[in-house]
Structures are given as C-alpha cells and as structure tokens.
Image: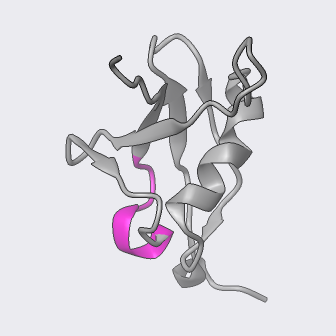
Amino acid sequence: METTATKVHGIRVGDVSGQRWFKPPPLALDLRIGDVVPEWLPGLGLPFRNEKGEPVPYLARLEREGRHLGPGECVGDALRDFDEVTLHPRINAG
C-alpha cells in the first residue's frame, strides 16, 4: 500500500480561460511535468493537434508561484498537494 508521501494529491488543472477545471488522479513524485501535461489535455477538452495536424505544445503555469513549470521538472520538486496549474498553448511569435 502506498503512502501519501509518494504522491501529490488534490491538484487542480485549468485551461487559460479559467472556465474549465479538471482534477487528475494523484501524481507520483518522480513523474516529469512534460509527461503529465499531455495526460491532462483530455480532461480539459484541449486539442493535441492544431488544424494543420501539428502537435500543440502547452505550458503549465503553477499559480502558487506565478511561474511556468519546465517540462523536465519532477512533480515532487515542483508541486504540492492542492496546487492549481493552468495550461495554455505555447504561442510562437512570427
């Protein structure tokens, strides 16, 4: 049986509009942010691909710290129980 110390619980993930929220299951501490963000997209109804069929990269903003999480950061280093994370597509100015 796993203890609560091996996972982060109660995370709330929202879209950039603030109108859709999703509560994913508890997250293992050793997962990378870049691996969990794609798993959150269906819960928010966000697209994996744009109209050209290209992958849509998303950034995850940790509301508690007011910063974007790096894809290589570990869940256990970045997130705490009951944190809120906002996802938004990465926009490349052109």
- Horizontal side of residue 85 vs 28, given as left or right: left
Q: Position of residue 42 (x, y in %)?
A: 77, 31
Residue at image location 65% in from the left, 61% down from the top: 26
- Residue 52 vertical placement versus 69 (above, below): above
Q: Quadrant of the N terminus?
A: bottom right
Residue 48 horizontal/vertical position (percent): 73, 30
Q: Nearer the viewer, residue 13 or 51?
A: 51
Horizontal relation, residue 8 to residue 65: left or right: right
**What residue do we see at 39% from left, 25% from top?**
92
Image label count: 0
Residue 92 appears left or right of 21: left
74 horizontally vs 46: left or right: left
Which residue of the protein is positioned furthest toward the front in this rendering? 94
Q: Any magenta on residue 9?
A: no
- Give the colouring mode of the picture: one colour
Residue at the extreme bottom of the image, as rendered: 1
Q: Nearer the viewer, residue 78 or 5?
A: 78
* Residue 76 in magenta stretch: yes
What residue sits 67% from the left and 41% below the top? 40
User: 21 above or below 81?
Assistant: above
Q: Position of residue 46 (x, y in %)?
A: 68, 22
Question: Where 58 sits versus 81, above or below?
Answer: above
- The one of 85 and 55 positioned closer to us in this rendering: 55
> Which of the 4 image quarters holds residue 21?
top right
User: Is 55 above or below relative to 81?
Assistant: above
Residue 65: where, in percent of width, then height? 20, 48
- Quarter of the rendering occupied by the C terminus: top left
Dividing the picture into quadrants, the one containing residue 29 is: bottom right
Q: Which residues are magenta?
A: 75-83
